[in-house]
Image: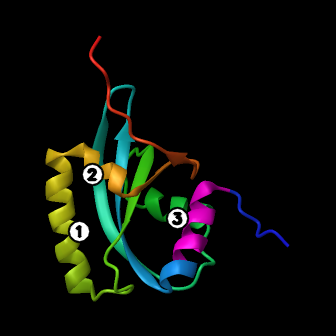
Amino acid sequence: MTPPWETDFDEWLAATHREAGDFTVLFVLMAIDVTSVTPLRSAWLHVLGDKTRWAEMAQLFAGAGVDWSGVVFWRAGREGLVPDAEARARLNALTRKLHEDRTLIRDGDFFNAEGLRLQLEEMKPH
């Protein structure tokens, strides 16, 4: 029986959990327009199991109080779950670097507000 994936995010979370077990994820909510992506808010969470679905994540993101249109996820580390203090430090380092270099989005898993996978592409000068 095929699992009931409704979004690319649902499939990604289940596949990541199969590979890593429980894990900590860093995420950054983004504003996306035609030519840019702008980081808005960031946090981390511990993923326990693979039952979380996009609708639950979107509800969580609604509490951020910003008009976001995308989100990027990065595993906090290969070790799976990391302590909160370590997750906070890794998130701070990541967000500092992300403000300088948006191409770091390519190292994460990028989704739109509907939970569908996005890919960051560089704009070519005309």
**Above or below, 90 relative to 69:** below
Distance from disc 1 to disc 2, alpha carbons, whole Å, reads: 13 Å
Q: Is residue 113 visible?
A: no
Residue at x 57%, y 53% (from the top left corner): 115
Q: In front here: 17 or 62?
A: 17
- Residue for badge 1: 91
- Residue of label 3: 57
Q: Which of label 1 and label 2 is nearer to you?
A: 2
- The span shown in magenta is 7-17
Image quadrant containing the N terminus: bottom right
Of all residues, the one furthest to the top in this rendering is: 126
Mark 1 lies on a secondary structure that is: helix
Residue type at mark 3 is Met
From the viewer's perspective, is 28 left or right of 98?
Answer: right
Which mark is drawn over residue 124? none
**Element on which disc 2 rests:** helix
Q: Position of residue 6 (x, y in %)?
A: 70, 58
Front residue (pair 109, 71): 109
Q: Which mark is residue 104?
A: 2
Q: Can residue 118 be seen? A: yes
Q: Secondary structure at mark 3?
A: helix
Q: Nearer the viewer, mark 2 or mark 3?
A: 2
Residue in the image at 20% along x and 58% along y: 95
Residue 9 painted magenta: yes
Quick one: label 2 or label 3, which is nearer the N terminus? Answer: 3
Tell me the mark number nearer the camera, choosing from 1 and 3. Answer: 1
The alpha-carbon separation of the residues under discs 1 and 3 comes to 18 Å
Tag 1–tag 2 contact (CB < 8 Å) = no
> Dot 2: within a 10 Å radius of its alpha carbon, few (fewer than 14), some, or many (20 or more) residues?
some
Q: Horizontal and vertical percent for residue 110?
A: 44, 51
